[in-house]
Amino acid sequence: MYLRSTTLLLAALTLFASLFSSASSVEIPQITVQTPPVTGEYKGKIGVLVEEHFDETELVAFQQYFPVHGYEVVFMSYLWGQPELTFNGNDHQRQVVVKTDITQVDLSQYAGVILIGGYAMDRLRYETELSDDGVSRAPALAFLRQVIATDRIKIGAICHSLWLFTADPSLLQGRKVTAAHNIAADVRNAGGVLQVENNQAVDTFVDGHLITGKHPAVVDVFMETFLRELDKS
């Protein structure tokens, strides 16, 4: 009887440990072609906007964390008329194959959109031609405006990714945010209100539907905060 009870207890503890560590145990291949399947109750989609020189820590973390909490991760970008494009990370250790073009996205299917860190958003704000009125017509800016206009979709920005917002200061004017120290001047010049404590940008901040994170070192807290805001909807 004692042996059976001990065996059952050990089995329960093993199961608990497995569930507790399920997110971090998901193996992510060096080349992402398909994201991990959702486990448990399906809650919706999270679009992750990427381009060349994305942050690799975040690419892995998003795939490990959100699917086990019910959200499908969809990597998306502007594909320049191609059926798919492959992007390389900052450390040249990981790649992601993107087949979803932001000009074709049905936003009604999405609960959230995250702008990945690294230098991806700098590339996505590129314009082939400059307009006389100074308003950016980069496809990624058009997409971001559409996301904001839903007044429903949660938007995540971490590290350098507010760079996309700064290409259209009207999107950032008066918004309380955090970001990498490297782009503090860019954020402030675009009208963003950087949240600082003890001479450091805070780790995360929530201003309405906009959830921001300081840098990849706080990606876990950023994802937890983003998930909490999603689940409020």
Image (spheres, rainbow, N blue to C red):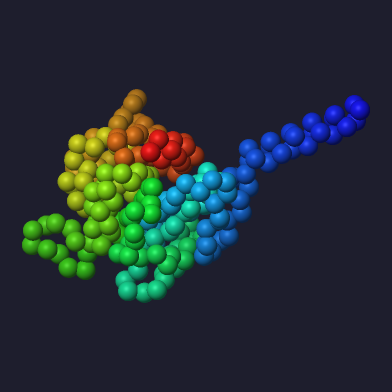
Query: Splitting the image into 4 quarters, where does residue 85 fall?
Result: bottom left
Does residue 106 show up?
A: yes
Q: Residue at x 88, y 32 (%)?
A: 4
Q: Residue at x 18, y 40 (%)?
A: 173
Q: Quadrant of the C terminus?
A: top left
Camera-nearest residue between 232 and 138:
232
Query: Splitting the image into 4 quarters, where does residue 80 fall?
Result: bottom left
Q: Compared with residue 142, is residue 207 higher up or lower down, i.e. above or below?
A: above
The spot of residue 87 in percent (x, y) is: 43, 65
Q: Compared with residue 56, is residue 100 higher up or lower down, i.e. above or below?
A: below
Number of callouts: 0
Does residue 57 show up?
A: no
Camera-nearest residue between 141 and 14:
14
Q: Quadrant of the N terminus?
A: top right
Camera-nearest residue between 168 and 68:
68
Q: Residue furthest left?
A: 132
Q: Compared with residue 13, is residue 62 higher up or lower down, i.e. above or below?
A: below
The spot of residue 199 in percent (x, y) is: 32, 28
Q: Residue at x 31, y 40 (%)?
A: 209
- Residue 39 left/right relative to 151: right
Q: Residue at x 81, y 33 (%)?
A: 8
- Residue 58 left/right relative to 113: right
The spot of residue 198 in percent (x, y) is: 34, 25
- Residue 64 left/right relative to 11: left
The spot of residue 32 in percent (x, y) is: 52, 62
